[in-house]
Amino acid sequence: MSTQFPLREKRKAATRKSLIRSAQVLFIKQGYEQTTLEEVAQHAGLHVQTLYRHFANKLELAAAGDEERLIRFRRAIQDPNQTETTFVFWRDWMLRAVTRLEQADGVENYREQMIELSGPAFISGHLIRIGLEYEDLLTESLARDFNLPAQGIGTPRLVAIMLWGVHSHVIRSHAKHEGFDFTSEAIRVIDSVEELFGHLVVKS
């Protein structure tokens, strides 16, 4: 029984990943509104009832990729063994994320996906909520770096707003303009913010 359980969990995770990937492909190709859950399941080689065991509706499916990335980010930045400053951590995280993106989907596919999924108001609201959670996590991490309170609109919050807010601007620019150098611009922004506030870091 103990050997079967991990295998079952791996299969469950693989099925979920396949459904998320199929949804992303079809949302780009056909549009979010025009894509049915039956089509997503068929594209993944699964029955629609299997899809419903993982996702209650299409919005939940569309949001799943962002949710899983947020979970990984939260786990990493809150890891007690994490010793890098927030600036270094965020820069490395961005570089790894873009590398995975280029290897898996291609930057242009990501650009098309952002254009498609930023349209419906309920998805836009989801993206705003996700962004606020990233901002909160960055604020907490910066507060530890600066040895300052994380509550209120203090320096950690303001720096987090700069890091995430300009990051969001870079994503929107990438979504609107073909040939936009996502990686270079994102790293340039992080470097600029660190240049302004890096001297506040007291973390050893």
Image: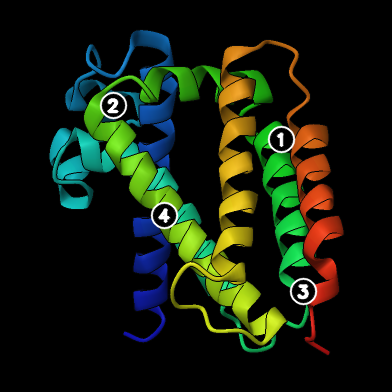
Q: Secondary structure at mark 4?
A: helix
Residue 88's x, y, as percent? 80, 64
Question: Helix, strand, or loop for circle 3?
Answer: loop
Could you say which disc has been placed on residue 85 in the image? 3
Q: Secondary structure at mark 1?
A: helix
Earlier sequence position, callout 1 versus callout 3 = 3
Distance from disc 1 to disc 3, alpha carbons, whole Å, reads: 27 Å
Q: Nearer the viewer, mark 1 or mark 4?
A: 4
Residue neighbourhood size for the residue with mark 3, other residues' Cα within 10 Å, grouped as few (<14), some (14–19), many (≥20): some
Give the residue type at disc 2.
Val
Q: Which mark is residue 28?
A: none
Whether residue 14 can be seen here: no
- What percent of the width, then of the height, locates residue 128? 37, 43
- Numbered circle sitting on residue 132: 4
Question: Residues at badges 1 and 4 in contact (C-beta under 8 Å)?
Answer: no
Q: Residue shown at 80%/44% (left/top)? A: 187
Q: Residue type at mark 4?
A: Leu
The label nearer to you, 4 versus 2, is 4
In x, y percent, where is residue 55? 20, 46
Residue 40 image label = 2
**Three-letter code for the amino acid on which mark 3 is drawn:** Thr
Question: Which circle's residue, 4 or 2, is located before the other in the chain?
Answer: 2
Q: Mark 1 or mark 4: name the one nearer the start of the chain.
A: 1
